[in-house]
Image: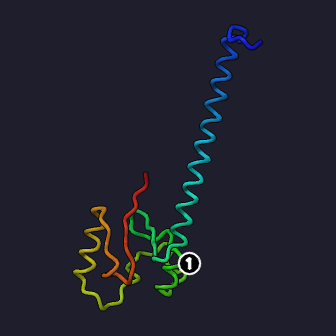
Amino acid sequence: MSKQSDYSERDMSTLGILADSIWQLIRRQRQDRTIETLSSAIAQSPNAVIITDLNGDIEYANEAFVRSSGYQLGEVVGKNPRLLQSGKTPEQVYADMWARLEQGKTWPASTCRSMTLVPVTPP
């Protein structure tokens, strides 16, 4: 039964479906490993990282943020990063920052508590 002619059209179709399913599973496992690697990199970064939703509300902050800000994660999730305002920074700096972030540009660390703010939009 090693000849291809010994296999029916249905057999070939079933093998094709099985091969496609296996390939999709392998691809998904590779994607999961990539996501785990990137998540670990963000969590372990020595730089503070904050991830917000499209409304600007904090969804995630890493341990470096907790150390540098003094806030615990539970205190900032769901809040706007405005809570970090010291009152010493001119309002124009914040206006410039939000304008850059809304354009998808980064905000340099030197102007914001040693943090770099990077807008991330969902795929």
Viewed as shown, does residue 63 lie left or right of 13?
left
**The residue positioned farthest toward the left in the image shown:** 92
Q: Residue at 56% across / 49% down in the picture?
A: 31
Q: Residue furthest bottom?
A: 88
Q: Position of residue 8 (x, y in %)?
A: 70, 11
Report crowding for label 1: few under 14, some 14 to 19, many 20 or more residues within 10 A (C-alpha).
few
- x, y (%) of residue 1? 77, 12
Q: Secondary structure at mark 1?
A: helix
Q: Amino acid at mark 1?
A: Gly
Residue drawn 31% across the image and 62% down it: 104
- Identify the residue position indicated by label 1 in the image: 74
Q: Quadrant of residue 15?
A: top right
Outermost residue, front direction?
2
Estimate the x, y position of residue 114 in percent, counting from the top left.
Answer: 38, 82
For residue 28, side relative to residue 115 (left or right): right
Residue located at (74% from left, 14% from top):
2
Vertical relation: 22 (above or below) 46? above
